[in-house]
């Protein structure tokens, strides 16, 4: 039986998330105040998206901190799943924000009101610049971390929404066509829902212990059986502890031989899995008897050939 160790996320990413969190708090205050003063639903909608950014960055930072907490008797895998649960909660909150925006936009479409478009564009431009700083802070630093990636995607979506709000404010200032304000808010809602559905899909897949999307189970089976000394594999399970930490358990069929020879084979399988598939936590049970269950992914010898 072989066990690999899980390594915590990098400290630099946590620090960058803290800086991004502080900038986002300032953006939120500015956009909420600006939306109220200018009577712009698009700006308030963008503030709703910024609130989602704040939530995403906050739980990403907290989840990274929890992921560094060592395993204990109560949670033998540690707290890696905190990241996935946070992403799920974030996705649900985004859907709630989207519903509020749609209701408010529908009312505004039925009865448009004048918006102070000049100040609205100025406030949105401030948000755009701040979001650009955050994107530059986080870009390329998230690795395979689902929650950090989702936070970055939120900020990118908010940056694009800010561009739309700035452009919409300029159009309203030039033409007086105030119907564009609720239309822009619906555009922002579309961006929010895109990230929300993606978060719900990915986090649910991990919580249901689905096979990681980047791993093909048949390829893992073939790779194990290609290791010298392995005659078959069954009870093969691959799942994610969080978005970038994979775990696996399996029974491997070997010859009836000494414990030392078996341990060498099992060790070679574990190293191969980490090198080729980034499966860092493996539990392998060697057996010398052929599995008698019906052929399937769970019980198979030679099916991958």
Image (cartoon, helix red, strand yellow):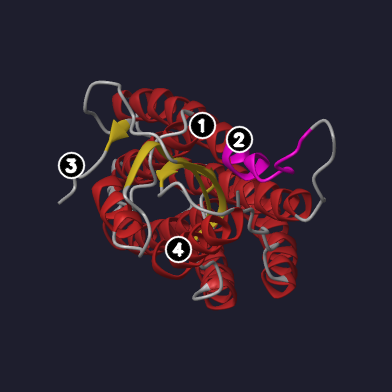
Report crowding for label 1: few under 14, some 14 to 19, many 20 or more residues within 10 A (C-alpha): some
The answer to whether the residues at label 1 and label 2 have Cβ atoms under 8 Å apart is: yes
Q: Is residue 82 magenta?
A: yes
Q: Please name whichever residue, 165 or 85, is drawn nearer the observer in this view of the structure.
A: 85
Report crowding for label 3: few under 14, some 14 to 19, many 20 or more residues within 10 A (C-alpha): some
For marks 1 and 4 on the same chain, the one whose residue lies earlier in the sequence: 4
Q: Please name whichever residue, 294 or 148, is drawn nearer the observer in this view of the structure.
A: 294
**C-alpha separation, residue under disc 4 versus residue under disc 3:** 49 Å
**C-alpha separation, residue under disc 1 versus residue under disc 2:** 8 Å
Kindly state the secondary structure of the residue where label 1 is placed.
helix
Circle 3 sits on which residue?
A: 303
For marks 3 and 2 on the same chain, the one whose residue lies earlier in the sequence: 2
Note whether 146 is above or below 72 in the view shown: below
Report crowding for label 2: few under 14, some 14 to 19, many 20 or more residues within 10 A (C-alpha): many
Kindly state the secondary structure of the residue where label 2 is placed.
helix
- Say which residue appears at 56% left-offset and 73% top-offset: 141
Circle 1 sits on which residue?
A: 207
Would you say 110 lies left or right of 272 here?
Answer: left
Tell me the tag on residue 85.
Answer: 2
């Amino acid at each position: 039986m072989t066990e690999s160790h899980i390594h915590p996320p990098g400290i630099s990413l946590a620090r960058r998330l803290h800086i991004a969190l502080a900038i986002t708090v300032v953006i939120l205050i500015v956009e909420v105040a600006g939306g109220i003063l200018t009577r712009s639903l698009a700006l308030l909608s963008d503030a709703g998206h910024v609130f989602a950014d704040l939530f995403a960055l906050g739980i990403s930072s907290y989840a990274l901190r929890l992921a560094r907490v060592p395993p204990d008797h109560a949670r033998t895998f540690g707290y890696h799943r905190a990241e996935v649960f946070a992403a799920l909660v974030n996705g649900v909150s985004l859907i709630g924000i989207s519903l509020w925006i749609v209701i408010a936009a529908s009312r505004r479409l039925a009865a448009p009101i004048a918006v102070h478009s000049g100040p609205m564009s100025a406030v949105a431009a401030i948000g755009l610049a701040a979001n650009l700083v955050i994107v530059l802070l986080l870009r390329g630093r998230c690795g395979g971390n689902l929650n950090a990636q989702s936070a970055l995607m939120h900020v990118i979506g908010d940056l694009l929404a800010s561009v739309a709000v700035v452009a919409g404010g300029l159009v309203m200032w030039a033409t007086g066509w105030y119907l564009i304000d609720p239309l822009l808010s619906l555009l922002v809602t579309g961006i929010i829902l895109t990230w929300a559905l993606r978060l719900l899909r990915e986090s649910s897949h991990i919580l249901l212990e689905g096979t990681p999307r980047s791993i093909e189970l048949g390829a893992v089976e073939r790779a194990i059986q290609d290791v010298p000394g392995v005659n078959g594999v069954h009870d093969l399970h691959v799942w994610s502890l969080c978005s970038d930490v994979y775990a696996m358990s399996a029974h491997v069929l070997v010859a009836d031989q000494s414990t030392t020879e078996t341990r060498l084979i099992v060790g070679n399988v574990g190293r191969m899995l980490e090198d080729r598939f980034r499966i860092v936590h493996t539990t392998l049970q060697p057996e010398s008897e052929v599995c008698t269950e019906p052929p399937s992914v769970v019980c198979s010898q030679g099916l991958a050939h």
